[in-house]
Amino acid sequence: MKKLLPVIFFSSLLSFALWAQKQATDPISTEDIKAQMFFLAADEMAGRDATSPEGRIAANYIASEFMSMGLKPVGDAETYFQNFDMTIGPMDPAETSLKVKIGPSEKTYALGHDFMWTRQSAHPTQVSAPLVFAGYGINAPEYGYNDFSGIDVRGKVVMVLNREPQANDPNSKFKGRWDTVHSYAWDKIEEVRKAGAVGLLIITDKVPRRKQRIASATPNYLAGPAPEYALSGSLWDLPIFSITPEVANEILASVGKTVESAQSAIDATGTPASFDLSNVTVSMSKGFKNLEVRKARNVVGLLEGSDPQLKNEVVIVTGHYDHVGVVSGRIYRGADDNASGAIGVIEIAKALCALPKRPKRSVLFITWDAEERGLLGAFYYVDHPIIPLKDTVANLNMDMIGRDEVSSNWPTPADGNHNMVNVVGTLYNRDIKQVIETQNRGIGLKLDYKTDTVDPESWFARSDHFCFAMHGVPMVLFNTGEQADYHTENDTWDRINYPKMEKIVRLIYLSSLDIANSDPRPKFTP
Ligand SMILES: [Zn+2]
C-alpha cells in the first residue's frame, strides 16, 4: 500500500493539472449558460411547444449558434434542420370504443374507466378480430425469449402484460429488477405491429410502480385536455388501449384463466406461455377531431472528426428543446425541462469547436423536437439516421440537468442533491460509465446510478436516448431528477442550480471528447 501512495499522489496531481488546464481553456461558463437560459425559458418563448411559432424560434436560435461555431449543416438540403411531419388532433371519445364478444355475448367497455388511451398513431382506425394472449409481447433473442413463437398474431388483436418476465426477481435474466428496453410499451407496440397484429391491449399493473408526484402548481397534464401528437409515418400505427386487470380477467375467464395465472405460468420458469383466445372477438375503434399535419424539426450540426478512418463514426450529444407550451393561459416555461439540456448541447459544441485539434471521431449535436409528445423527434431520427446507426458509437443525452432532486420515490432530500446528477442506463453501458467516472475525478460531482437497480419513475424510457437503446446503440441519460416544479409553470430560469449545471455540462463535454478520441468503441451489453 505504502509503495502505491506516491504513484497515486503523482497521478492525482497530474489529473488535477490536466483538469485545471481544461478548466482554463474550455469556454463553458455559468454566465454563458445563464444567458442562454434567460432567452430560451423567457415568458415570450411561451413554453416552446412543438410546432408553435416560439418552438420554431428556439430551433432558429440553436441553429444560429451552430452556424456561428462553424458546425456542418447536415440536415435536410444542407440546413441545420431535420424536418418531419406530425399529425395532430384531439382524440374523439365518441369514435373511440372497445367491445369484446365472447361466444354469443358482447360487452361494451367504458373509455377512461375500463380502458385508457395510450400513445399511438393518429390515423382513424376500426378493427374487429380474434384475440390472442401473447405473454409480455416481447421478442428478446439476446435472452432466448420470444412470446410470439408458436402462435400466429397476424390479423389478430393481441393482449399483453405490462413490463417483463420476473420483473421483481433480482435473478431475472432480464437484468434482475431493472426494466430492460423490452419492459416498455414502445418496444411491445413495435414488436406486435411488425408481427402483423391489427390491435393491442396492454394490461395495466394492479399497483402503480411510482409514488405520487407532489407538484408546486398545476401540472400541465392536469391543466386540460391536450391534442394527440403522432409521427405521420407507420410508427405505432394500430389501435392501442391499456385495459384494467378486471377487464382482462373477464376475458380470460372464458378459458378458465386469470391475469395472475397467465402471468405466473410465465414467471415461474421464465419461459413464454402464450395462447389463442379464438372464442373471443375484440372490436377496437379510434377516431379524432380536426386532424392536421404540421411541421416539426430536429436541429442538427456536425463537427467532423480529424482521423481519416474514425471520422466516419460518430458520438451523438443530445437534448430536447421543446416543452409543453401554454395550457389554460399558464406558461410552462421549461427551464430545467429541457432548456437546460439544449443549452448543454450548445455549450459542449462550443467547447469541442474551441479545441486546437478536432476529436478523432465526428461529433453530431442534435436538439430534439417533440420529445414531450412522445420522443417523436428521436423516434424519427433513429428511423432516418444522418450517420448510420452502426457507425454511431454512443449517444449522451441530457434531459433536465439543472435542479436538485426532490422525489417521494427516493429518500434523499434536496440538500443532499446539490451536487448530484443521475446517470441512467449504465447497466447496458459499463464502458461509458467507466469513461464518465474517470472524467468526473477532476470535477467531483456525485454520480448517482440508483435507477440501474430499480427505476420507479421510468427514467430509462422517459427521454430520447431510449430510441438508441432500442437499437442497441450505447447510450446514457444525464438527469438531475424530479422536483415539485416539474411540468408546472414554476420551472423557471431563476430556479436553476447553475454552478452544478456547469459541472454537469463540463463532465459530458470531457466524456464525449474521451469517447470520440478512444480507439475501442464503448460496448452495449444486453
Ligand atoms: Zn424533458
Image: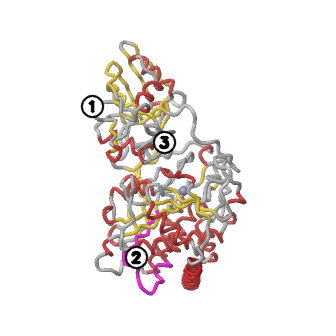
Region of the chain picked out in magenta, as a range: 350-367
CB of mark 3 near ligand 1 (< 8 Å) = no
Question: What residue is disc 1 on?
Answer: 150
365 magenta-colored = yes
Residue 492 makes an appearance in the image: yes
Amino acid at the residue labelled 2 = Asn
Q: Residues within 10 Å of mark 3 (few under 14, many from 20)?
A: some
277 magenta-colored = no
* Residue 277 in the image, given as x and y percentages of width and height: 34, 22
Q: Residues within 10 Å of mark 2 (few under 14, many from 20)?
A: some
Pointer 3 and pointer 2: residues touching (CB < 8 Å)?
no
Determine the image quadrant of residue 400. Answer: bottom right
Disc tally is: 3
Question: What residue is disc 3 on?
Answer: 90
Question: What residue is disc 2 on?
Answer: 517
Give the structural element (helix, strand or loop) at label 1: loop
Image color mode: secondary structure
Mark 2 or mark 1: name the one nearer the start of the chain.
1
Amino acid at the residue labelled 3 = Pro
Between 120 and 350, the residue placed more toward the observer is: 350
Give the structural element (helix, strand or loop) at label 3: loop
Mark 3 or mark 2: name the one nearer the start of the chain.
3
Measured in 3D between alpha carbons, the distance from the residue under mark 1 to the one under mark 3, in whole angstroms, is: 39 Å
